[in-house]
Amino acid sequence: MDLAAQENSKRASRWIKGVKVGEGTFANVYKGEEKATQRKVAIKKIKVGEMKDGLDMTALREVKFLQELQHPNIIALLDVFSVKQNINLVLEFLDTDLEAVIRDKALIFQNADIKSWMAMSLRGLEYIHRNGVLHRDLKPNNLLIAANGELKIADFGLAREFGDAGSKMTCQVITRWYRPPELLYGSRFYSTTVDMWSMGTIFVELILRVPFLAGETDIDQLKKTFHAMGTPTEQDWPGHTQLPDYHELGSYPKNPWWNMISSIGKEGQDLAREMLRYDPPTRPSAKQALQHRFFSSYPRPTPPIALPKPLAELRPRALAPDETKGKPFLGSEGGSGAMKRKAESPQIGRNVARKLVFA
């Protein structure tokens, strides 16, 4: 046995793999623990042998970024080892996710709670962006929550580094309900502002307790956005009519949509409006959002340990086929998005370790 194999065997022997808690096309997730300390972990076994061309870029990206990005509000990669043809990622085990919290109607949210979840999300996102990375799949069930209440950003399978403004990227990213209009119109040149739109929709969802813009297709997603906010004009969003997939969808009047979230207060309404501006360059950065008066005004953010959490036992289930494909469907009207999350799907009773599964 060579030195590399010996080191790999030593790493593998540190961990005990327990029951399967999630299953996907190319990966399974197991509960596990560290032999020496009995610390609970999640072990993700990536089935390399079942991939047509070996380990795909989705898996490589997640390993790369989890190794590089270490922050209290980002899920921690604890170890990596191989067994036969499978690669195993050892990650910290997290109890629940923000989607389960939002859906649990037994929980009562205070504005201070929403402020705390948003602050933790934005702190993690600010660190990600500061290190030259776009997440490109922010949504409530990718915001995991630890036993101590700390929120951690997970699932970097669609993340990528970004450089200068001229870098061309795919628009086939971000789960539809959280995808900004510029990507729905086919923009290939974008930056951190796409993540900020996603955070804005999550903010509104925390307040409303239902998804804000829940389109069934890409066309329907644009229509729902315009119906809620009004059809953008050239003044609202310069140059949007020149985007590759632009087409007119009718004229919807401008609405003061922020009135539906009046319970969060004027500062919160103002922050949501800024994050959900049509014109991408006018959206605040994560750092600017954290400096918004919403976070310094009364009430102060709830300490993480005091935040509400679901009381129901989280039960594992297999991943649905459409949750294992790795990238969204961006077809014509009438398509069914592979990354679409249905509002009527049961959310309580899921073990969020399954959210760590690669596609």
Image (cartoon, grey):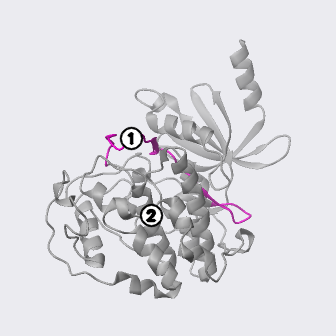
Q: Main secondary structure of the magenta part?
A: loop
Q: Which mark is residue 284?
A: 2
In the rendered image, residue 166 lying in the magenta stretch gets the answer yes
Q: Which mark is residue 164?
A: 1
60 or 357: nearer the viewer = 60
Question: Which residue sits furthest right?
Answer: 36
**For marks 2 and 1 on the same chain, the one whose residue lies earlier in the sequence:** 1
Q: Position of residue 242 (x, y in %)?
A: 17, 55
Q: Position of residue 128 (x, y in %)?
A: 54, 49
Q: Amino acid at mark 2?
A: Pro
Q: Is residue 246 left or right of residue 323?
A: left
Q: Please give the range of residues in magenta.
A: 145-171
Residue 193 in view here: yes
Q: Which mark is residue 3?
A: none
Which quarter of the rendered picture does the N terminus lie within? top right
Image label count: 2
Q: Is residue 132 left or right of residue 95?
A: left
Q: Position of residue 194 (x, y in %)?
A: 39, 56
Instruction: Give the residue at x 67% y 57%.
Output: 94
